Image: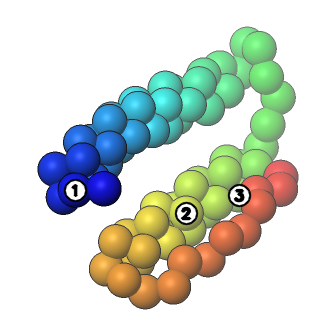
Amino acid sequence: MTERDKRQKFEELAEKRVNKVIKDLRLIGNLSNRNNYSFDDGDVRKIMKALDDELKALKVRFTQARPSEKDFKL
């Protein structure tokens, strides 16, 4: 695979995956509607921590460190 092919593949996948994550984050944001859902501050903290942890791990991966792969559980 040439450098140009690698770059094109990166751009294609990055756009697709980032747009999916943005869509999913908006869907998570929809959970904040108290008319439809019941939750407490502890639930919100767990969600925010899980998202923050994964974003930090992503940043580390792009700086060549080893990633942490944890599953989220409420």
Colouring rule applied to residues: rainbow
Crowd rating for badge 3 (residues with CA inside 10 Å; few <14, some 14–19, many 20+): some
According to the picture, the residue beneath numbered tag 2 turns out to be 54
Q: Quadrant of residue 56?
A: bottom left
According to the picture, the residue beneath numbered tag 1 turns out to be 2
Q: Amino acid at mark 2?
A: Glu
Disc nearer the start of the sequence (1/2): 1
Task: Give the left or right position of residue 14, taking residue 27 as reference.
Answer: left
Q: Quadrant of residue 45?
A: bottom right
Q: Amino acid at mark 1?
A: Thr
Q: Quadrant of residue 38?
A: top right
43 lies above or below 57 = above
Disc 2/disc 3 C-alpha distance (Å)? 12 Å
Disc 1/disc 3 C-alpha distance (Å)? 43 Å
User: Tag 2's secondary structure?
Assistant: helix
Which residue is found at the position 83% from the left and 56% from the top? 73
Q: Amino acid at mark 3?
A: Lys
User: Tag 1's secondary structure?
Assistant: loop
Q: Residue furthest left?
A: 4
Task: Give the left or right position of residue 6, taking residue 17 as reference.
Answer: left
According to the picture, the residue beneath numbered tag 3 turns out to be 46
Which residue is found at the position 51% from the left and 85% from the top? 66
The answer to whether residue 42 shows anywhere in this view is no
For the N terminus, give its image quadrant.
Answer: bottom left
